[in-house]
């Protein structure tokens, strides 16, 4: 019942066709551990999903960075879960802190999105994490528990959920959580799942860490018992992403 290591690459709102082709070449040329050992999922902006999906070798999967909360229709500018399914995109990132903060996505809204995406058969990387202010006031565990509860309230089957703990103060700042800080929160999240969802879900759900992970700090973080992989932003656009994938072994 081992949890397979998971490495996600969130390209955010970056890239041109040429840059996407370059990252794809770097990934395709790299020798990475087999899919039995590590699941690698890269997340280009929507418009580059077909290009990335069709040019990446089968060792890699793709994820969208968001999708709409319910069936598509008159929602100008949105991309629906149905469209992702239609394109054969297997994964979607939901609840990223940039969307929570900049677009006011609430815990409940994220919970609804996760439930809807799962109901269509998508796999979800669900992001949670506290701000610096919340950490300094000692409410980290309360905040991430509340965020997880909003998902658990709407979701009964966790088979297709990866939970990404991403402290907001560590995202894009170069300020990585120490392995002990990350492990502490991951262990608490696993305990929360055990007490509020079930022992099986707690034992099998992958909880990955995100926030300034790079080629230099990934190995020590990966060595923590409750860190089951990473969601990587900035470094997923660089060749060091390969080193992060290799930290699975
Ligand atoms: C992210 O955007 O999910 C992220 C973790 O970014 P970075 O690795 O750049 O901190």
Image (spheres, rainbow, N blue to C red):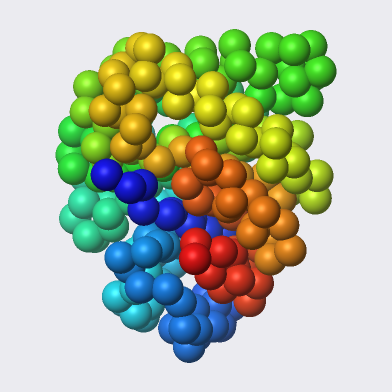
Q: Residue at x 58, y 52 (%)?
A: 222
Q: Is residue 92 above or below residue 198?
A: below
**Residue 103 visible somewhere in the drawing:** no
In-front residue for pair 37/67: 37
Q: Quadrant of the N terminus?
A: top left
Residue 55 visible in image: yes
As rendered, which of 173 and 17 lies closer to the eye?
A: 173
Q: Quadrant of residue 154?
A: top left
Q: Is residue 219 left or right of residue 162?
A: right
In the rendered image of this protein, does residue 220 appear above or below residue 118?
below
- Give the left or right position of residue 219, taking residue 175 as reference: left
Residue 64 percent coordinates (x, y): 40, 52
Q: Residue at position x 19%, y 55% from top? A: 86
Q: Position of residue 123 (x, y in %)?
A: 29, 45
The quadrant holding residue 170 is: top right
> Residue lying farthest bottom?
29
Expressed as whole percent of the image width and height from the top left, the position of residue 20 reads: 52, 75
> Would you place residue 120 above or below residue 233 in this image?
above
**Image-quadrant location for residue 61:** bottom left
Q: How many labels sit on residues?
A: 0
Residue nearer the viewer, 151 or 201: 201
Q: Position of residue 51 (x, y in %)?
A: 38, 74
Nearer to the camera, 160 or 248: 248
Residue appearing at x 21%, y 28% in the figure = 157
Q: Residue at x 53, y 69 (%)?
A: 246
């Amino acid at each position: 019942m081992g949890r397979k290591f998971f490495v996600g690459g969130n390209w955010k709102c970056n890239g041109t066709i040429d840059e996407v082709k370059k990252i794809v070449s770097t990934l395709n040329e790299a020798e990475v551990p087999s899919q039995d050992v590590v699941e690698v999922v890269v997340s280009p902006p929507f418009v580059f999903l077909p290009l990335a999906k069709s040019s990446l070798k089968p060792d890699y999967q793709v994820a969208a960075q968001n999708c709409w909360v319910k069936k598509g229709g008159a929602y100008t500018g949105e991309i629906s879960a149905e469209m992702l399914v239609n394109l054969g995109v297997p994964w979607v990132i939901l609840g990223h802190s940039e969307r929570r903060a900049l677009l006011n996505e609430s815990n409940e809204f994220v919970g609804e999105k996760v439930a809807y995406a799962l109901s269509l058969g998508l796999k979800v990387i669900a992001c949670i994490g506290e701000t610096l202010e919340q950490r300094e006031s000692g409410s980290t565990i309360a905040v991430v528990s509340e965020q997880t509860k909003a998902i658990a309230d709407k979701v009964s089957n966790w088979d297709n959920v990866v939970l990404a703990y991403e402290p907001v103060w560590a995202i894009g700042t170069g300020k990585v959580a120490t392995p002990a800080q990350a492990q502490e929160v991951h262990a608490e999240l696993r305990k929360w799942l055990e007490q509020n969802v079930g022992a099986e879900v707690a034992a099998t759900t992958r909880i990955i860490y995100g926030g300034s992970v790079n080629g230099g700090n990934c190995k020590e973080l990966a060595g923590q018992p409750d860190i089951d992989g990473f969601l990587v932003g900035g470094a997923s656009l660089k060749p060091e992403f390969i080193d992060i994938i290799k930290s699975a072994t």
